[in-house]
Amino acid sequence: MAQMVTTAGIDVSKQWLDVALWPKRDEVLRVNRDAAGLRELTAWLQEHNAVRVGLEASGGYEREVFDALEVQGFEVALLNPLQVRRFAQAKGRLAKNDRADARTIAHFTAVMVEAPSPSRRRELDELSEQLNFRRQLRAWIDDCTNQLEHLRDKGLRRKTEARRLKLQAELKAHDKALAKRVAQHQEWSALAKRLCAVPGVGPVLSQTLIALLPELGKLSRRAIASLVGVAPFDNDSGQRRGNRRIQGGRAVVREVLYMATLSAKTWNPAIAAFAKRLAGKEFKVIMVACMRKLLVILNAMLRDGADWKAKSA
């Protein structure tokens, strides 16, 4: 009789890691989320012959855990927290705590994960952090702009305007530093040059795609659209045909892609012609379709190693 593979689930928090095994339901562990805790964790998993380990994306807290386990030879699967929670609800498990979550993750990894996640590209971490800081700068600038619409006190308006100008100058300097960082990296520079040749695609979108969508050019058109969240899903039942809607996907990538598509509708002949054919539909429907069209074009270019050609798009 074939021996069942032991899988582990890790609930990652800021302070510690809760670990459980499947099908060994009584085997649990809690360690600190630090170097000593990671050493204890890997030793414990090796002792219990765990082969595959699942952990949820946890806002970055999971990265060092993922890396440490991968280095030790474990198959590591990075999971979508919403999918894991839906799995728990399907089992009738409504309680939620760290230990119970670890057990659920272990069970989910055992029955729902067909293959481990691709190796994490650690060299992209720095670029991702730089882009995250840029988004924060943009949010602070928008906050100042929104405050100025309602402030009447002259002193407060001067302070807020001064803060906005300072943030705008910092954003400009940050963009220059980002461009320099990308130019110094041979692979990133080549990708950015190819992407930015497409009308509507600027430095921010190219940098975002490089850092946050490394799958671009490696997946099918349907898969890449679904991954970003610009693939409408069916909503039918019997004779009822519901509206198609997008859901899920990488919101940060989608937000930048949206802004680029606004420009592409004017300056990119392929996107402009496509949008014209959709005239009469709701604005959001046209925008999502154009976003998907632009993404598919970029995906095909990187897949084929081809440069932008308007007539062939």
Image (spheres, helix red, strand yellow):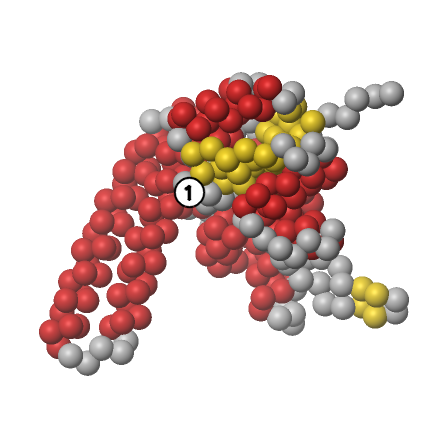
Question: Which residue does the image show at 32% across and 38% down from the upper left?
Answer: 178
Q: Quadrant of the N terminus?
A: top right
Tell me if I can see residue 68 in this picture.
Answer: no
Q: Amino acid at mark 1?
A: Lys
Q: Residue furthest left?
A: 155
Q: Residue furthest bottom?
A: 152
Residue 117 in which image quadrant: top right
Residue 305 x, y percent position in the rendering: 57, 29
Mark 1 neighbour class, 10 Å CA radius: few under 14, some 14 to 19, many 20 or more: few
Question: Which residue does the image show at 22% across and 49% down from the upper left?
Answer: 170
Residue 242 in which image quadrant: bottom right
Q: Mark 1 = which residue?
A: 14
Total number of numbered labels? Answer: 1
49 versus 104 height, above or below: above
| Front-most of residues 241 and 206 | 241
Tell me if I can see residue 184 in this picture.
Answer: yes
Q: Is residue 205 left or right of residue 277?
A: left
